[in-house]
Amino acid sequence: MSETDLPAEVAAIRKSISEFLDRKDEKGRKIGNSKFGVYAFYDYDGEPIYVGQTEEKLRVRIRRHLTNQRTDAVAMSVLDPFEVADIEVWPIYPAKTGKKELPKIRKLLSRAEYTVFEKVLSESALHAVLNEKDIPKGAKIALPVSFRSRIIPEAVYELRKHPDIRIARRANTISTLARVISERNVSKGLRQTLLTQARRLERLARIRFDQIAGDVPVEEPGEETGETIDK
């Protein structure tokens, strides 16, 4: 399917993702073209939901997650691309990139990924993300400059952020993930992801109930939940 054949909403989101990845750093480099880097996805509440690293360009890896839907995380219903409202990336530019340097680069990537992982955990209300595999512990590093932006156009954002829509979507993801677990011999990590998804659903459903019950003001159209950082 070509871009012109996509529904307008999907095409608008893909365009927004491309615009973000085409942003340039202080040296004029497009951030999406960095071969190495770490990335994090955030939901409509600003909650971190997934952390990863790549050595195939940030652009390629992120688009695989959010547009092609051909990653294990999406296939296993660990990550629902519909949930991703913000992306943050940490492009990494090693001094040398030859084959001999690859082991050192991978070690650096792993340390950077762990540092980001610990960072977003400390900022999470649930102190959890949806990664189904443990990120190996390592010595933390001073992270490079990050770039973060919302990837959902305003008109689409206003519709998708409604808690009832997100509750229904999240419940469906949990159902699919539970079915996958029931049919396969899966890792402990995938069961942990199911638990985290259930906690995320319970928290959102409770917030929505409190809104309806009058304990929390119901957000009016045009107002924003959470904080979007656009560096």
Image (tube, helix red, strand yellow):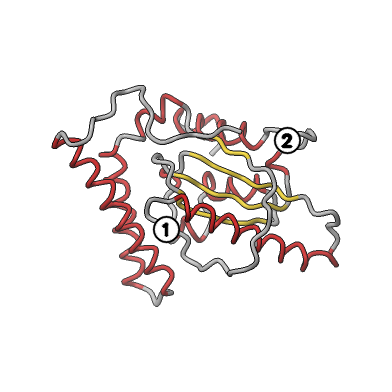
Residue 4 vertical placement versus 113 (above, below):
above
Mark 1 vs mark 2, CA separation in Å: 30 Å
Image x and y of residue 186, in percent: 41, 74
**Residue 12, placed above or below residue 202:** above
- Kind of residue sitting beneath label 1: Ala
Instruction: Give the secondary structure at mark 1.
Output: loop
Residue placed at 78% from the left, 66% from the top?
104
Query: In the rendered structure, which disc, 1 or 2, sits on the residue that comes first in sequence?
Result: 2
The answer to whether 31 appears left or right of 127 in the picture is right
Tell which residue pokes out farthest to the bottom in this image.
185
Q: What is the x, y in percent for residue 36?
A: 71, 53
x%, y% of residue 173? 34, 54
Which residue is at 31% across, 65% downward? 179
Nearer to us in this view, 33 or 195: 195
Residue in the foreground of this view, choosing between 39 and 210: 210
Mark number, residue 25: 2
Q: Position of residue 6 (x, y in %)?
A: 49, 33
Residue furthest to the left: 213
Depth check: 166 or 196 in front?
196
Tell me the quarter of the image containing the C terminus: top right
Q: Looking at numbered disc 2 in the image, what kind of residue is underneath it? A: Asp
Corner quadrant of residue 161: top left
**Position above or below: 223 against 22:** above
The residue identified by callout 1 is: 128
